[in-house]
Amino acid sequence: MQMPGNNFVAAVERMSRALEQLAAAPSAKAMLQEVVRCAAASLGMERAAVVWFDTEGALVAQVTPGLSTEAVVSCGRHLLQGAELDSAPWHFDLGDTGVEPKLAGMMDAMGAASLLALPVLGASGGCVGILLGPSPEPRTFSCEETRRFNLYARLAGLAIERGRWVESARTSALQARAEAEQAELLRLTSVQAVTEAFGRALTREDVGRAVLELGVPAVGALGGTVHQVSADGRSVELVAAVGSSLEELAPWKLLPREMPGMPGYDASERGSPVWLESPEEARTRYPAFVPAMERQLAKAFAFLPLRVEQRNLGLLVFGFAQARHFTELERTLMLGLARQCAQAMERARLYETERTARLQAEAAGQRLQLLADAGVLLSSSLEWESTVVGVARLAVDAYSDWCAVDFLDEHGALRRLTVQHARPERALLNDTIELFSPERSRPSAITDVVRTGRSQLVTGLLPPGSCEAEAGTGRQPEGGSFILVPLVARQRTLGAMSFVRGPERPPFTEADRSLAEDLAARAGLAIDNARLLRKARAAEAESRHHAARLRILVDVDRMLAEAGLDLPAVLDVIARKVSEVIGDGCVLQLMAEDGDFLEPVTIHHPDPEARWLLAGTVHARRQKRGEGLHGSTVSSGRAVLLPDIDVEEARASGGLSEYLPYLDRYGPQSLLVVPLAVKGRVFGTLGVVRDVAGGRPYAEDDQLLLQSLAERAALAIQDARLYGAATEAVRLRDDFLSVAGHELKTPLSALRLQIQMLARVTRDVATTPGLAQRVEKAERTSERLGALIDELLDAGRITAGRLTLQREEMDLAALTRDTVGRMSEALARAGSEVKLVADASVMGRWDRVRLEQVVGNLLSNAAKYGRGQPVEVCVETGREGRARLVVKDHGIGIAPEDQGRIFERFERAVNGKQFHGLGLGLWISREIVESHGGHIQVWSAPGEGSTFTVELPRE
């Protein structure tokens, strides 16, 4: 069933135009680029930057040339997470002692001696980013410069807000488009179900029930009825109904044809639908319909005429529970249902007529036998050419002397399938019948029958010379006759059948024409079914082909996923799988670091000898970008397909030097090379070679499959490369931290020793007032620096997997008491009194040094964030006999969203100048506890302090 889709298409086009307009508008990034350029100029500088949060919450930056994006983002993150933002400008100088070290390092990374920063505010007043003006030289900024810079901060806020709005609009348009497509799919599904039901319906009652049972839910109606004009045309009969009781239907079972003032009569007479969207509209337009409407639950109606070829067959009515406005899409759907219902009822009528004619034909034994035999023959095979030839052979034996079958080919031209004779001597009319052959360029009876779809019956057909031959006998020759009938199936003409009787047999009659039409109808249906089957088989074969291709792609995705991010494994998977599914050989080349030459990275062939020869020739002839088969593919970014090429052609072309030895050894080959590209950047090629003698040449399907594989291969290779680079960067960073920690440890130890000696001297000898306090402060500073270096060394050991445990039998309670005692002075300086509950021994096999480190880290953490409040420490036996250590402070607390993050490397719940440290203590503590088989957790809330709980197994 074909339904007009104008409204859906128009909606999609409107969405597409909206998306195109959004895409054509200047991007937020382009506007911000201009803003930072002008902002820099307003300060008389060449550099400026803006940092903002994108729609996904990620921090991004737009910088002028010469600025490091990474440094700008780090600085912007630091400032945005710092003090409360307002519209006042910030001015930082490296020479200012008030600049915190972390910010000073970020300014140094940007090459800024002075920094002017302004918050970027959105339309709602919230901070959406920050505008930075780094100056390479120390300087101050005047009020006028600050005012202009503030103006550009506002422009940046407007640009960012506009970019977010554009992205939101684009997302909404795409979502609306998807919803429209889904609605169209649901509508077509409902229509398809109705169409299938119509295909099964054989009577008008079946048609009526089908359209109502499936159509009423499809259009959202309360109920519906189908009415048909009676055979005499004087009345209208109720054929089917849904949603009404028998009592409600009683007045509508039989109605007169003429009912002026009623909507159904108006729709039938005008041949156009009547839409009543509310009771008020019904009262206004059709007052006579109001009493009937008030007896029903429906408040809105659709009266749809059923017409076929300008003939009025009846009426389809839908009733709706509420008053409503019928949209164009709803009207189109209901009109389509009405048209299909009319055609189905017409088919049902034709079916009933055909059944009646068949029953009448069955009364004639010979005709019945012919139809039966033809039916058996047509149903015996789906090869329609042979079955139709068999029907023609049956016809010339019992029905006619001569039979021809002509059919329309796929181009619409008539082609003769067969000519059958009852006996060779009955071919006396061949020359005359040739006048009606479809091969003739001039119009003929057959072409007329095919064009009009109407059969022809001609009698009194005489061969040349027959009149003179019969003149001596004194009797008038009766002559032969012929019938031409169209081959029709599903209202489409497929060809024609011709039947001829000679003069010695009675001429054809109208009853014979009916029989011929019936026979042609069966032949036409057989032809149509066979053609549909062939198309279905072709579609099935195509579907299997696509399914096989999809399985290959899924298999490749699975194998690439199993290979992970190991580049050699990824390359091996690609080469082997491509060689397996497309074959025979596979050559994968990637661009060298210089970007000029291609480097073969993987070559595979199932034959080791062929693989060795292919690898040798390709490695020996490195290709430059733009040269050779692979080099030209990289340069153009397009696939190259050579279905069949031999060594002579390769030499003549001059562009296949890398394959010449291979072609010379194995003969003609088929070559196919596609680019490896990610985001439009070509960084390699994937080529395959196949022996033409042993298999078919590569075709377009192979190219499409290889391009699909290349897309996946390119992404996998790119991911593996990026992962390798990231892994190497992490390794280098960890090595640096380890080396730096070791290098700092030795001079720091010497420094601490000197400071300790100086402290003893100052305590024993009278010195300058205040010197002892300064020495003590220096000693504490060196201790804190040593702790930081120890943390860096531990971080390196943990990351490298070199953290070892020296287990011994020990008492956790005693260890905790010793650690608290050793840290009592530091805790007292922080103003935190320690309440220790560790009276009972808690024995176990643990690493004493590492657990002292855990207890020390937790106590230091409590003193740092405890706001000078008491700290409670408890050692006890927990669940299942485990050792439990609890450290509780009454400090600032930790937000729920930060409680998981604080146990990660370089993470702290609070950022600020008043809290120092690397953010490694809790991470190291967690690693130590988990290496003992235990776990550490925290319970906290802002302003209510924090409780850290460590549980350890005894062994």
Image (cartoon, helix red, strand yellow):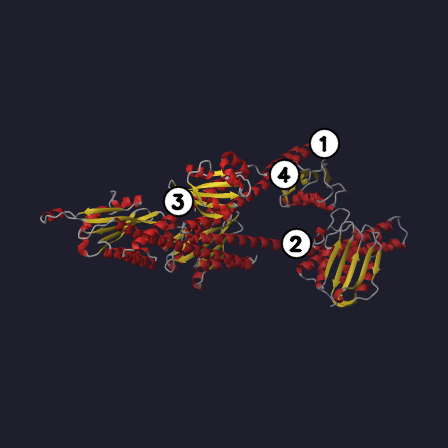
Mark 4 or mark 2: name the one nearer the start of the chain: 4
Q: Front-most of 185 and 132?
A: 185
From mark 3 to mark 1, how far is it between C-alphas? 94 Å
Q: Secondary structure at mark 2?
A: helix
Task: Determine which of the numbered discs, if any, sits on residue 733 in the image.
Answer: 2
Q: Which residue is mark 3?
A: 230
From mark 3 to mark 4, how far is it between C-alphas? 69 Å
What is the quadrant of residue 421 in the picture?
bottom left
Q: Which residue is mark 1?
A: 143
Q: Which residue is mark 4?
A: 161
From mark 2 to mark 3, how far is it between C-alphas? 92 Å
Q: Secondary structure at mark 3?
A: loop
Q: Secondary structure at mark 1?
A: helix
From the viewer's perspective, tell me whether residue 653 is left or right of residue 949. left
Tags 4 and 2 touching, CB below 8 Å: no
From mark 1 to mark 2, how far is it between C-alphas? 43 Å
From mark 4 to mark 2, how far is it between C-alphas? 38 Å
Of marks 1 and 2, the one in the foreground: 1
From mark 4 to mark 1, how far is it between C-alphas? 27 Å
Q: Position of residue 334 (x, y in %)?
A: 47, 43
Residue type marked 4: Glu
Tags 4 and 1 touching, CB below 8 Å: no
